[in-house]
Amino acid sequence: MTISVEHNHREHLLKSLVAMLGQQIPTAAIITEIEQLRAFECDAFTTMRQLPLLTVLPETIEQVQHVMRCCYQLDIPVVARGAGTGLTAGSMPVENGVLLGMSRFDQIHNIDLDNRTALIGPGVRNQAVSDATAPYNLYFAPDPSSQLACSVGGNVAENAGGVHCLKYGLTVHNVLELEIVTIEGELITLGSAALDAAGYDLTAVMTGSEGLLGIVVKIRVKLLPIPEYKKVMLAAFATIEDAGHAIAAVIGAGIIPAGLEMIDQTGIRAIEELMHAGYPVDAAAVIICELDGSAADVEDELNRVIRIFRALNADDIQIASNAVESKRIWAARKAAFPALARLAPDNYIMDGTIPRRALSQVWNQINQLAEEYQLQVVNVFHAGDGNMHPSILFDSSDESQHQRAFELGTRILELCIEVGGTISGEHGIGLEKINQMCLQFSSSELQQFHALKRAFDDKQLLNPGKQIPTLARCAEFNAMHVHHGDMPFPHLERF
Amino acid sequence: MTISVEHNHREHLLKSLVAMLGQQIPTAAIITEIEQLRAFECDAFTTMRQLPLLTVLPETIEQVQHVMRCCYQLDIPVVARGAGTGLTAGSMPVENGVLLGMSRFDQIHNIDLDNRTALIGPGVRNQAVSDATAPYNLYFAPDPSSQLACSVGGNVAENAGGVHCLKYGLTVHNVLELEIVTIEGELITLGSAALDAAGYDLTAVMTGSEGLLGIVVKIRVKLLPIPEYKKVMLAAFATIEDAGHAIAAVIGAGIIPAGLEMIDQTGIRAIEELMHAGYPVDAAAVIICELDGSAADVEDELNRVIRIFRALNADDIQIASNAVESKRIWAARKAAFPALARLAPDNYIMDGTIPRRALSQVWNQINQLAEEYQLQVVNVFHAGDGNMHPSILFDSSDESQHQRAFELGTRILELCIEVGGTISGEHGIGLEKINQMCLQFSSSELQQFHALKRAFDDKQLLNPGKQIPTLARCAEFNAMHVHHGDMPFPHLERF
């Protein structure tokens, strides 16, 4: 009986909404067929799935404004989606909500060479920006592993990073101006083409807000000159401690590499098996270091890095002598996660960030925890900026393993918080880490987040239930957490 | 009669507040004597003055929390003040409000070498951070002209820049974590020691919010390695156009100097008269260019810059051959504003930022406007990042000049907006530019700012009347503006 009432309600809502949307949006851009909706039920965190009420694929800013006005009037939630490559269920639909696909906003509006900026739609792929600006010797710095597929709008939503963000910053450091549509359908501009903008820094607030504050419809990104010269090296270490100290020593010497990555033995072996890149399979850890700048500068820094690595017992140092070899080293690193997929059916990728001084300590503690939970953890770190991606390998068809994997994940994030780090480096919170937000922040801090959210979205219609947990949710989670009860995670029905 | 009632109300308020504050704050830290309060009646924008109800000089975070709780309970406005070097009346007191002086928070709590950060109080002077970290070969990058005197808390409030922000960013790019006390007296932490933090980017929102959102009580700043090698040069140009093109050409060549400044002839002559630094007094403009990095890199870039400058008819290029000569060039530039004080009794310093491509166009238009208003304008630019500081020279004792100076200022800011720039590069809005915010932003955008403000300060007690104009104020201003009526600016009673 209840189900039938709910069903009727849903049908009624769907009908009203489709009629209202249809006033300004072509029928072909409104998707209501279950089979077609399946394509939008999850992002790359595939453990969590939910069909939306419908999907809209607008093509113009006016259409986005219309969608928002309809949803605001009918009190219907809206979840925005870029390319769907997110790793934290941030763009998973809400039941009885609209999934707003922004893929058709894929135009590069202009490239301003004097000011080194590009004005683009949020649906433009990350790599496409650098491809379009390469003829002018410019590129867009954020480079998440998914850069071939992910959209810049998604990069903004998650404040994405990448292997080069140690030197060139996260997305927030590479975005100057955003045009957004609010939940009430207003079009507003945040930031400016200049370095500073008057008023509160809403560009920074919007960046990393995971679709909870507004819909980004235009983005002005900074472009950087392609470095004149690059050098990539790979060094093998016999112990985790030496590798950890080597990272600290490079940074301590005042060198800021373009990339500084660390991979443990399991990771090395998995990558090598897939990519045959010449990674040293007997090493406890390898470090990949990329230096860029002028040729003289890079060669000088390269020699200093080699001396530091040798002093810490690096026993195999490969220096790429040309672009092909550099690409081979990086391609293998970027294939780390596909490579791990061959080791186990499921892979729970963490994204904690810790102060650099804690690197080898945390690495060792993670290995101890892995033993305790009887699971394999592979460590792939953006070590230079302390952003760790420990991957917990498990088989989700084994209920016990599944449960242990997520408990272990929570323990690892707690460890990050304990040493003064954070639970998200570049993947965002989404639904995946929403409980851990209760550990990271105090009630006052969460209340401040909620107050800010209400300032943009008083009806709580934008991507509801994601990123910032309610205080009630935290009370429940902390109670269970303190009593070491069963973790509710990741049972979808709780969200 | 009215006056007497108001006076009684004020006396009553003062008495209640002093009693309440006294419960946790020593009497000596509560200032109520008019003569002593005079020290706090304005910042460096001395045209605007206002005595506060009282001044409190807390020494501990608990005391700040107590002040806020008292004010929140009694509905008393609070204006925070750092070193009082601000240029936009941002820390000018409010009548019947508390002036919260943060000068006693002047401790450097720790310097973390592994993570290259320092944890400091907001009252620490900007220069003191770099002095304390110099033994470790580290420094704090933002360097406003007032860096000997200004506090880092003030830098955070105004999102201060400086001559090196082209390469090393504004304050927001050099702050990782803030502890703040809210208007309700809660202590919360924004950001983290890591590169990214979970949740909305409240660190960025707080930076540049001019005391309207909370009181900063602790700051974790990034430290940068002191560059191995620096080279400073001064080049003279016979026309403004050549100088403007030279700036664009340097940036267009992919060179990012540590500093890239431009000064016009009147500025050069005023500086030279005061400082005897060897500036070429017959040039239409000079450019100061500082390059830093490794020796090889700097020498290579220096040669490229010289070639660019020569191709654009630079007829006198001085290259500092040692630290003393570099210092001479910079010290003279940093003395530009004191030097201008010798030319006229008053100096209205603007702070617009424009896209680089518009530099010489805007420069010429400013000179035309100066002629129209029969006033002298001196142009000193942080040219590399398009941040202009045109200085309008006038005598405030001449009412007509005073009026024309502020009208001209408004025209210059409008010009910045027209070419796609902003009305503030690094000095903030305060009271000085609050009307121009009505030109820069739409009603929807201002409403979004107000909504954000309410999320932090529902009673509108923090630095009320500054930075973000009410829509009513803008309606009034725009009406007058459109009708070319008298500018109400800067009559204090209107604020």
Image: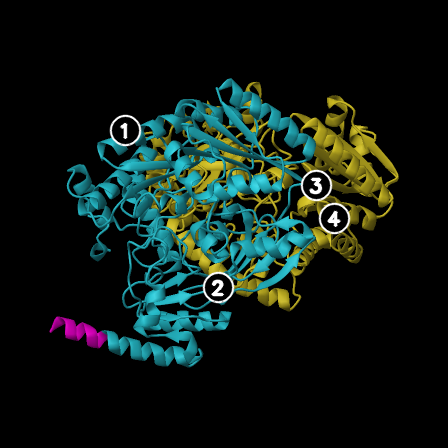
Chain colours: A cyan, B yellow
Circle nearer the viewer, 4 or 3: 3
Q: Are marks 2 and 3 on the same chain?
A: yes
Which of the two labelled residues, at mark 2 and mark 3, occupies the earlier sequence position? 3
Region of the chain picked out in magenta, as a range? A1-9
Q: Position of residue B106 (x, y in %)?
A: 48, 26
Q: Residue at x 56, y 64 (%)?
A: A107
Answer whether residue A169 is visible to the viewer in this image.
Answer: no
Q: Position of residue B151 (x, y in %)?
A: 53, 32
| Residue occupied by mark 4 | B248
Spatial separation of the CA atoms under disc 4 and disc 1: 56 Å
| Residue occupied by mark 2 | B444
Q: Position of residue A394 (x, y in %)?
A: 27, 44
Spatial separation of the CA atoms under disc 4 and disc 3: 10 Å
- The question of residue B479 being in magenta is answered with no
Q: Is residue A402 above or below residue B39?
A: below
Spatial separation of the CA atoms under disc 2 and disc 4: 35 Å
The subunit carrying tag 2 is B
| Residue occupied by mark 3 | B255
Spatial separation of the CA atoms under disc 2 and disc 3: 39 Å
Q: Are marks 1 and 2 on the same chain?
A: no
Q: Tell me the element at label 3.
A: loop
Circle nearer the viewer, 4 or 1: 1
